[in-house]
């Protein structure tokens, strides 16, 4: 990602991984050392999310203390999820460890180390009770969280049940590992029979996506990392989205982005738009950044990769950047009123 | 590359490919169409250097007019040379075309389209005669140019010979395609028996590298693109390099960058430094940018990838960034006086 001074409200920088106070993560070093021994590995690759990369040298030190004669390679590629594996490093190391995300797809090649948070969740949930609709009025409630807090999911559920709620949860789809888990691009776990959903977790990135995907639900945020309770408000996002679609309506040429990251490619979507439009050009890249797109002189872009780049970083691009669904509205394939959040399903 | 407001003197943005006036390049469309027909290709991948990416849509249009039913994929990855092939696209398309650079290594898979400049070179060479040492004093002269102007190399040589010079040229090494050709990272073609070298080509990026690699030679620049004659002055560069080495002398931890781009990897160099230093950590990435390195909390970096990122972009990084040779000086493996320009040899 390029340097930029202002971040959108939904950005990932406030979700807990970048907390400044020292927190002891469990890097599961013994499990890693065991895999290195078992495979008689010469090389081990480590991939961390952005907020934890600064810990990489000390984790490398710990591994080198536990095992002899292993070369540790640390991925310097940006990493924004389990969709974003460093496949170069994965293919070229004997043991490859991906930290901080739950498996999008299991593979013998990859050791996923989830890095669960040790932050207490019930105090902020207690504060959230004032903001939630009372169980007398709204007995049913959806409950979701992120991979980081999955270790306390049962505790969250019990807390709500003890207060009289009927807690509705589901696993979502293939892209998700755990019941109640959400990703920035997938909120299938919130497809439950409840008018309000409680999100317990750090930051607004995930609950804003949830609220866009499920505009009919009230999404309450209990954030144990930043210690705040709020209600997700998508108004700013939606205005920005409609603005982008309107600005793209006059576009005479389109750049259609196909993302080459392992878990962010939607080839059929890209091909469909190309087939639909003679003035569409297919652009392939891994990182989708304003700098890279500035080289291309088209009137608008459609991003078939990560939907959050479109919705959260959209205003930073020099031309309107739309999701595939928004493209259909902009060119008149469907009514503007049918624009929805661009959910990403499946793995790879 | 990230957005940045100031460019170093040696940057690539002024070498001709980004000229604003309209210039007709020969994209060799017939050769491309022929390959598509021959291989009965369903997909064709196009990769352009940064300055020509904006032409990609119209080249795609031209190809689609010449052949039916082919999907054109345009690489949106940054591209700074023939060392920088989009291997993802290359592996996944039936025909892969790389524009604007001469082959670093021939392959049946790759069609290289050189894009020769149509700019006249003799007028600016005539102006350069005033700046060059007279053939009466210095009869021997080296002559180098870039891939873009190779089509006029014989004309350049004749021009100098007609004025009484003995023109010394050589091909360089494996990394170079043509006699007299220089790359940003390789000036072996200037290893000739002459005290002055004439560089004919756009910008200062190449001649500054040449002057750093051959500090004993006087390098005169005849720039037919920007229509100026100058003498390469490396003082600013050298001050910056010595400054970086001095700042890195106290470093207690090092990030050693291994570049994963196909033509920019020097594994032995990276491994050598790791073996030499217990406080060195190996970081792997394709694009080496200030943003990516900011995530790593080490005291200094050694870049085993593209040397020009180190020398030209060095001041933009948050910690001193050294070449492998400079690293050796900083840690005391060799005297400071032996620091030289970091030349890149071989292909992949």
Image (cartoon, coloured by chain):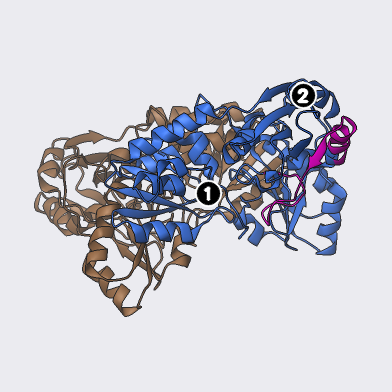
Chain colours: A blue, B brown
On the picture, is A156 further left or further right than B182?
right
A294 or A104, which lies in front? A104
- Residue A177 colored magenta? yes
Chain under disc 2: A
Disc number placed over residue B286 in the picture, else none: 1
Do residues under tags 2 and 1 come within 8 Å of each other at their CB atoms? no
Badge 2 local density, few (<14 within 10 Å), some, or many (20+)?
many
Across and down, in percent, residue B320 comes to: 56, 31
- What chain is tagged by disc 1? B
Q: Residue at x 38, y 52 (%)?
A: B81
Magenta-drawn stretch contains A27: no
Q: Secondary structure at mark 1?
A: loop
In the image, are marks 2 and 1 on the same chain? no
Residue B48, given in percent of the width and then of the height, sits at 34, 53
Residue B131 at least partly seen? yes
Measured from the top left, where is residue B264 in percent x and y?
49, 53
Q: Residues within 10 Å of mark 1 (few under 14, many from 20)?
A: many
Residue A128, numbered label: 2
Quadrant hosting residue A11: top right
Question: Which residues are drawn in magenta?
Answer: A154-182
Q: Position of residue B181 (x, y in %)?
A: 30, 55
Query: How far apart are the alpha carbons under marks 2 and 1?
Result: 44 Å
């Amino acid at each position: 990602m390029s340097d930029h001074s202002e971040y959108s409200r939904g950005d990932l920088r406030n979700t807990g991984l970048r907390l400044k106070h020292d927190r002891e993560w469990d890097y599961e070093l013994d499990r890693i050392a065991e895999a290195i021994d078992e495979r008689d590995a010469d090389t081990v690759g480590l991939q961390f999310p952005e907020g934890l990369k600064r810990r990489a040298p000390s984790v490398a030190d710990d591994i080198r203390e536990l095992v002899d004669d292993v070369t540790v390679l640390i991925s310097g590629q940006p990493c924004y999820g389990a969709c974003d594996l460093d496949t170069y490093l994965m293919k070229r190391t004997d043991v490859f460890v991906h930290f901080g995300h739950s498996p999008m797809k299991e593979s013998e090649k990859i050791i996923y180390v989830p890095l669960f948070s040790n932050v207490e969740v019930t105090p902020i949930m207690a504060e959230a009770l004032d903001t939630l609709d009372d169980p007398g009025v709204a007995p049913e409630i959806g409950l979701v969280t992120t991979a980081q807090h999955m270790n306390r999911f049962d505790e969250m559920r019990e807390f709500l049940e003890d207060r009289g709620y009927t807690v509705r949860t589901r696993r979502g789809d293939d892209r998700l590992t755990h019941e109640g888990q959400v990703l920035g691009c997938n909120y299938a776990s919130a497809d439950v029979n409840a008018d309000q959903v409680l999100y317990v977790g750090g930051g607004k990135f995930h609950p804003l996506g949830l609220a866009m995907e499920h505009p009919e639900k009230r999404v309450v945020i209990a954030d144990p990392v930043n210690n705040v309770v709020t209600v997700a408000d998508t108004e700013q996002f939606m205005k920005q989205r409609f603005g982008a679609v309107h600005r793209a309506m006059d576009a005479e040429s389109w750049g259609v982005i196909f993302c080459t990251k392992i878990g962010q490619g939607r080839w059929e979507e890209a091909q469909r738009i190309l087939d639909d439009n003679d003035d569409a050009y297919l652009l392939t890249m891994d990182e989708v950044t304003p700098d890279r797109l500035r080289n291309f002189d088209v009137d608008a872009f459609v991003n078939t990769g990560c939907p959050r780049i479109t919705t959260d970083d959209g205003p930073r691009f020099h031309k309107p950047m739309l999701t595939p669904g928004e493209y259909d509205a902009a060119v008149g394939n469907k009514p503007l009123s049918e624009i929805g959040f661009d959910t990403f399903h499946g793995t790879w």
